[in-house]
Image (cartoon, rainbow, N blue to C red):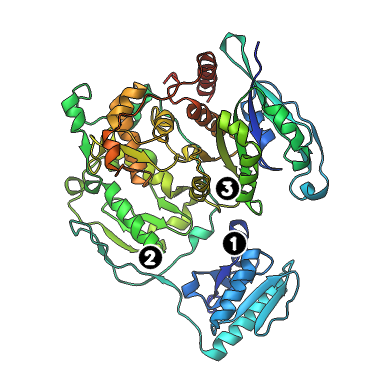
Amino acid sequence: MQDNQVKPLQAALHGMDGRTYKTMVIYFQGPCKGAAVVVEDIDAEVDIIDADFPAGKEALEKIREKNLPRPIIVLSREDAKLEGVLFVEKPIRLSAMLAAFTQARSVIESKGLTKPLPVATAEVAETSKGEQEVDSKKQRVDLEERKKTAKHKTAMQLDESGFSNFIGIIPGIDFEDREQVLNASYSPKNYFQGYVLSAVKVAKEKNRMLQLNSNWKPLLIFPHSHEVWLDADDKQLRAFASLEMNKATGTKLTITAVDPASSGAGANLERFQDMDAFVWKLAIWTSKGRYPKAIDINRPIFIKHWPNFTRSLITPHALRITALLINGPRTMLNISEALNVKPQYVFVFVSAAYALGLVGQAERKTDDLLVPPPPAPAKKDSKGLLNKILGKLRASK
Amino acid sequence: MSQYKIIFTGPVGAGKTTAIESISDSPTIKTDAAASDMTKSRKASTTVAMDYGVMNLAGGEKIHLYGTPGQERFDFMWDILTIGGIGLILLLDNTRADPFQDMRFFLDSFSKFIADTSVAIGVTQMDLSNKPTIEEYHIQLQGLGLKTPVFSVDARVKNDVSLLVQALLYSLDPGLEDDE
């Protein structure tokens, strides 16, 4: 075990692909027994560069140009014998790596460059209601996010019969009544979804791990790995997502630095989720078949690109809706008519895609005037075949 | 009876053979050989002719699943394979040095076939290398004027491969009626 009296060397990694980066993080924690930890560039005491990657060579040049006082460790198969650079030959031997750490530590101490352990702080992120506050106390950032392995869940595809059971229904809306359909909107900011989107935005802008606190369970946001951590299963999240926050909690939500001790994130790695997949399903469970209030139902919408459906909860007809919308802007009701699907299936899909920023309101005035043509069908003889393939694939999922 | 095909292509090690195995109703016919040269660094054996699988459809029809050899020196076979093809599944290995270059190469090589049909892209090995991101693939595709489905795919997972093929089919005709 790393001697608790010796603070780990705080290292920024450069020029490495994702796999190498993760390997190095594990290597420092494992074989190196915590002699170094990976931190963000701004918090680092030492730069470690893999010079055998093209991006590494570029990073080395840039860092040397900056002429920072902190030491540089270069990992490479060949020693370029650069002045002022500590070299570790690849394949890396533990003794050589630890020796480089020791040398780097000497340089840091001699130059008085020792940094306190990194902290994550967040400033107040005001919502329109001013409900979010930020705890300004500084806390030690835990690097547990880098200990875990990636967790991917393959998509769950809902059919129409399972949709209401799984998603729930909104009481008081009759989707058979056109007037009620037109008004079947919701405001994400009144729900947990709105607060999550706001917190994710802050975490991304600040490039910091943050914690969203409510009177429920803390949500941890990890912008570097594009993941979130929540100690709740989907059933619990589904129930909480549907509650209007002012009615449900009566308390303020806050964004603070991640508190690993209270969150327990390090103890339950299974609870890490892809950020987009989380936001997507949260929007589905908040929408329940309604559309976001910010979208004008009478004007066309566009989609930027296909969602990553293999990692998302798939609502009924979501692939068809995407395939139609990708060809050009349409109103939500036009999509419903063109594909002969219930409007709530279009609304729920649009809600999820809108939460991720994939769907927006078409801005061109001419889009309002155009009547989009029906989708171009496949040739009649092949259409039957394609339907059969679809039926086969969906039956054997 | 017509020969209907779905073509699986992509660089060496992208998971073409595995993807076909995931959705084929019969054991796939492989034409692997021990890898040599550059291929050896990525996998022990590689496809030198083609892989073949089949999906049995209602009414006795079959859809043939063909995997192209990943090595470029076999590209003379690609034109032949695509004759009668319904569409293209392009699998890309995210751990390769330049997946965008791979993508451009295969999209260019199959450009005529794609223009006549459609393409869906599956990115494999994203658990090992999460860069480039799916979003970055879309940015590259927008530069090429394409709005192609791009999904993270584990070629061993039937549902992943199935969704990719479904997206390909809906790209051909969003009006297809599924049995939802």
* Label 1: few (<14), some (14–19) or many (≥20) C-alpha neighbours in 10 Å: some
- Front residue of B7 and A156: B7
Q: Quadrant of the N terminus of chain A?
A: bottom right
Disc 1 vs disc 3: Cβ atoms closer than 8 Å?
Answer: no
Residue A21 as seen in the image, left or right of residue B78: left
Residue under disc 1 on the same chain as residue under disc 3 = no
The chain letter under disc 1 is A
Residue B167 to residue A293: above or below:
above
Q: Name the amino acid type tagged 3.
A: Met
Mark 1 and mark 3: Cα distance apart in space: 14 Å
Give the mark nearest the N terminus, 1 or 2.
1
Pair 1/2: label in front: 2
Q: Give the percent coordinates (x, y) of residue A276.
A: 42, 47
Front-most of B146 and B53? Answer: B146
Q: Is residue A49 above or below residue A113?
A: above
Q: Amino acid at mark 1?
A: Tyr
Residue at (21%, 33%) from the top-left corner? A184
Q: Residue at x 59, y 52 (%)?
A: B129
The spot of residue B92 in percent (x, y) is 62, 43
Q: Which residue is mark 1?
A: A21
Q: Could one spot residue A35 in this view of the protein?
A: no
Q: Which residue is mark 3?
A: B126
* Mark 2 burial class by Cα count in 10 Å: few <14, some 14-19, many 20+: some
Nearest to the observer: residue A327 or residue A232:
A327
The Cα atoms of the two marked residues, 1 and 2, are separated by 21 Å
Quarter where residue A329 is shown: top left
Residue at 59 percent of width and 59 percent of height:
A22
